[in-house]
Amino acid sequence: MRVPLYLEVAQWALLLGLAFLLIIVYRHLGRVFGPRPLAEHGPTAGTNAARFEYTRVSDQTLQYVRPGGGQPTLLAFVNPTCQTCEKLVASFSAVREAGDLAGLQVLLLISDPLSYLQISESFRSTKLEIGRVTTRATHNAYKVAATPLVVAIDAGGVIRSAGAAREISEVRAFIRACTMPLPDPALPVVPTVSESVSNALDTALASTPDQER
């Protein structure tokens, strides 16, 4: 028995409608439960960096890290399965070769299996220390919701900056963030020349009668 044409058209229209509805629901769920923008990841600047532990890849020994102690630290949460992370590790290696990482502790922290390191040339060739974080506690403490994430910590163990990076210029910006001294709160804030001139003009205009303006 042949199905009437109008029923065939109705069935196809229903299928197309359901497919369209599924696409809308999928996109909506992606907005609700999907990853946040990278700018929202990472710990808050001005807070104390959490201590953590990792397994050093080179000799499989367990290392304990307490940021601070007089040495600025750069933490890079990366993974060899992340293409942006590969670019970041290559940038870190280039900055190291230029001598710009002298006096800093730099750690590349991964969570992927160690065998994955072989798939990335940047990870295989870098001379920077790589550690594997085996618990979620470290990621939770540093609010690592996605990789890459760079955290700049000053010599006193205070987080100065955190965020995504991939280019050499961005790596150098994090270096400056963790090595520049904090402003002395005991010193008065000196206004710039433009601020002083602006304030003087505002005062003069406020004291001038309306008929003279």
Image (cartoon, helix red, strand yellow):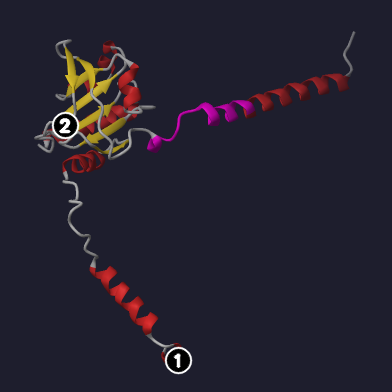
Relative to 12, is 30 on the left or the right?
Answer: left
Which mark identifies residue 23? Answer: none
> Which region shows up in magenta?
25-40
- Say if the magenta span includes residue 174: no
Residue 149: x percent and y percent? 31, 31
As shown in the figure, which amino acid type bears the numbered disc 1? Gln
User: To which quarter of the image does residue 209 belong?
Assistant: bottom left
| Residue corresponding to mark 2 | 68
Residue 111: x percent and y percent? 31, 17
Image label count: 2
Contact? badges 2 and 1 (CB < 8 Å): no
Which mark identifies residue 211? Answer: 1
> Image quadrant for the N terminus?
top right
Residue 102: x percent and y percent? 9, 35
Q: Nearer the viewer, residue 41 or 196?
A: 196
Specify the farthest residue to the top: 1
Relative to 207, is 77 on the left or the right?
Answer: left
> SS of the residue at dot 1?
helix
Residue 95: x percent and y percent? 16, 36
First reached walking from the N terminus: tag 2 or tag 1: 2
Q: Is residue 204 above or below residue 22?
A: below
> SS of the residue at dot 2?
loop
Residue at image position (63%, 27%) is: 25
User: To which quarter of the image does residue 212 belong?
Assistant: bottom left
By secondary structure, the bulk of the magenta-drawn segment is best described as helix
Q: Compute the Cα span from label 2 to label 1.
A: 62 Å
Residue at image position (83%, 19%) is: 8
Q: Residues within 10 Å of mark 1 (few under 14, many from 20)?
A: few
Residue at image position (30%, 28%) is: 85
User: To which quarter of the image does residue 179 belong?
Assistant: top left
As shown in the figure, which amino acid type bears the numbered disc 2? Gly
Residue at image position (45%, 91%) is: 211
